[in-house]
Image: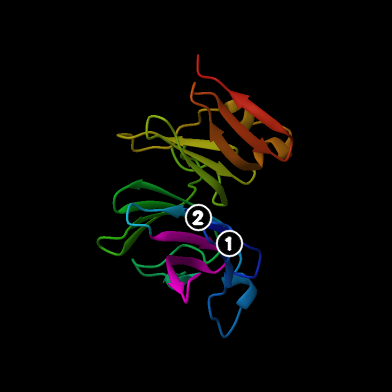
Amino acid sequence: DHLVIGTWGRGVLIISPDRQHYTLKKMFAEFNDVQVNTIESATLDENGLIYFATKMGVMTGRITHDQGRPDIELKQLLRFSHNSKGLTHDMVHSMVRIEKDKFWIGTEYGLNLYDRHTGTVQKVYYQDNNTGSLSNNLITCLYKGKEDEIWIGTYQGGVNLFSPGNVRFIDKLPAVNHSNEKGMRYVKSIHQQSDGTLWIGTDYGLLSYTAD
């Protein structure tokens, strides 16, 4: 399989399966070239289409070949817009596929539920005095758990949990989310082991959570 690496400001690096050839490909942009070509995260669908979260929206990539060398065709997919087909913010930090045609997209300001079948985006924000809302609008990371639940890492808001069938976000980790240590509430990464243990990377250090 090809190795695909997202870079900071230089686009996407594709390395051939035999690791003998590579191509560095950038998305063309008249303005904000570095932001467009800074890759924060990526996810893959069942047809081999790669979705890249960038500092200037979401772009897609499909691996091709040019005279025997690996290549990738990059296209802009989503940008900020106030309409129903735009994101809440251009700076995208994380993206996870939850169903065949549905993706969650975490941005600098708000969570977006993207339906690629209809091309529409449902926007979700923090709501003051609503305990069932997001705890913070800056979404740093998203992780799909073993039972299809979505763990949402935020800046200064800790971790939110969204389980299938629920209509609210759950304050699952109050010890993290309401800590006096600001660094603990700044979540940068989430991963779940096969036994269900959740590992949370924060500015305070590495934390683990096991459900009782």
210 over 54 or under it: above or below:
above
Is residue 1 or residue 136 the one in the foreground?
1
The magenta-colored residue range is 49-69
In this rendering, would 206 be left or right of 147? right
Image coordinates of residue 37 in percent, x first then y, are: 59, 70
User: Can the viewer see residue 120?
Assistant: yes
| Residue pictured at 34% horizontal, 38% vertical | 167
Residue shown at the point (46%, 70%) measured from the top left: 79
Q: Which residue is mark 2?
A: 42
**The label number, if any, that marks residue 39 in the structure image:** 1
Measured Cα–Cα span from mark 1 to mark 2: 8 Å
Judge from the rendering whether residue 2 lies leftward or rightward of residue 178; answer left or right. Answer: left
What secondary structure characterizes most of the magenta part?
A: strand
Residue at (44, 64) in percent of width and height: 87
The residue under label 2 is which amino acid type?
Ala
User: Where does the image place residue 101, in percent across and percent down from the top left?
Assistant: 29, 54
- In this picture, residue 156 sits left or right of residue 160: right
Locate residue 202, reporting x and y percent: 68, 38
Can residue 107 be seen by looking at this rendering? Answer: no
Residue at x 54%, y 51% (from the top left corner):
137
Q: Quadrant of residue 174?
A: top right
Are the residues tagged 1 and 2 within 8 Å (C-beta)?
A: yes
Q: Report the front residue among 84 and 68.
A: 68
In this rendering, position of residue 140 left or right of residue 59: right
How is the model colour-coded?
rainbow
Crowding around mark 2 (Cα neighbors within 10 Å: few <14, some 14 to 19, many 20+) is: many
Q: Compared to 62, does 179 lie above or below?
A: above
Q: Of the residues shown, which amino acid type is indicated by label 1?
A: Ile
Q: Looking at the image, which is closer to me, 79 or 181?
A: 79
- Residue 62, quarter of the rendered image: bottom left
On residue 18, the disc is: none
Q: Is residue 24 magenta?
A: no
